[in-house]
Amino acid sequence: MTLIKFEPLKDLESFSNRIQRYFEDFPSFDLSANFNPRIDVSEDEKYIMVEAEVPGIKKEDLKLTLHDNILTIRGEKKKEEEKKEKNYFRSERCYGSFQRSFTMPDEVDSAKIETRFENGTLYVKMEKMAPKPSNIKEIELK
């Protein structure tokens, strides 16, 4: 006889993820209508890499910080002044400031971070630090 694990909330979680993706794919449905860039975080044996899609943002309007192994990317996508002679039939682009923070999966060396900004994409490459030796001390029970 085969036992099948019953997980009734798994279907609900899957449904919730699909709904969330739907609203992420159509930012015009977002009531706050703030700019929220898409970000990928990946790693290999030596580096942690972050790629952020930030089209329409100038390099001067981006700020990166690393504090307690948390990488924070802040920026602002500024709206161009509307010209009175333009009649807008539709405006779907999002503007505003954003902040995204990510806890890095491993300790990174803050002195060895490389950044590159080209074609509306921010690239961050952080070198991992050597793992610290485990400091486990056995305590004798009395």
Image (cartoon, helix red, strand yellow):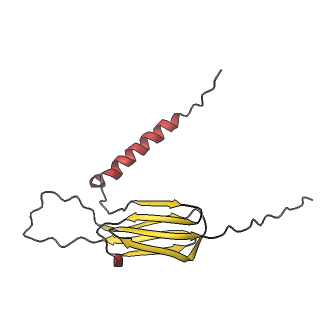
User: Which one is nearer the viewer's eye here, 106 or 36?
Assistant: 106
Count of labels in the image: 0
Relative placement, left or right, of 50 versus 85 is right
Name, please, the residue furthest toward the front. Answer: 45
Q: Position of residue 66 (x, y in %)?
A: 52, 73
The vertical placement of 31 against 119, above or below, is: above
The vertical placement of 4 against 113, above or below, is: above
The vertical placement of 140 against 2, above or below, is: below
Q: Residue at x 15, y 70 (%)?
A: 82
Q: Can you say which quadrant of the picture contains the C terminus?
A: bottom right
Residue 30 sits in quarter: bottom left
Relative placement, left or right, of 29 versus 9 is left
Q: Position of residue 27 (x, y in %)?
A: 30, 55
User: Which one is nearer the viewer's eye here, 49 or 104?
Assistant: 49
Q: Residue at x 24, y 70 (%)?
A: 79
Name, please, the residue furthest toward the left. Answer: 85
Q: Can you say which quadrant of the picture contains the N terminus?
A: top right
Q: Residue at x 77, y 67 (%)?
A: 135
Q: Position of residue 119 (x, y in %)?
A: 32, 68
Residue 130 sits in quarter: bottom right
Name, please, the residue furthest toward the right. Answer: 142
Q: Position of residue 99 (x, y in %)?
A: 41, 67
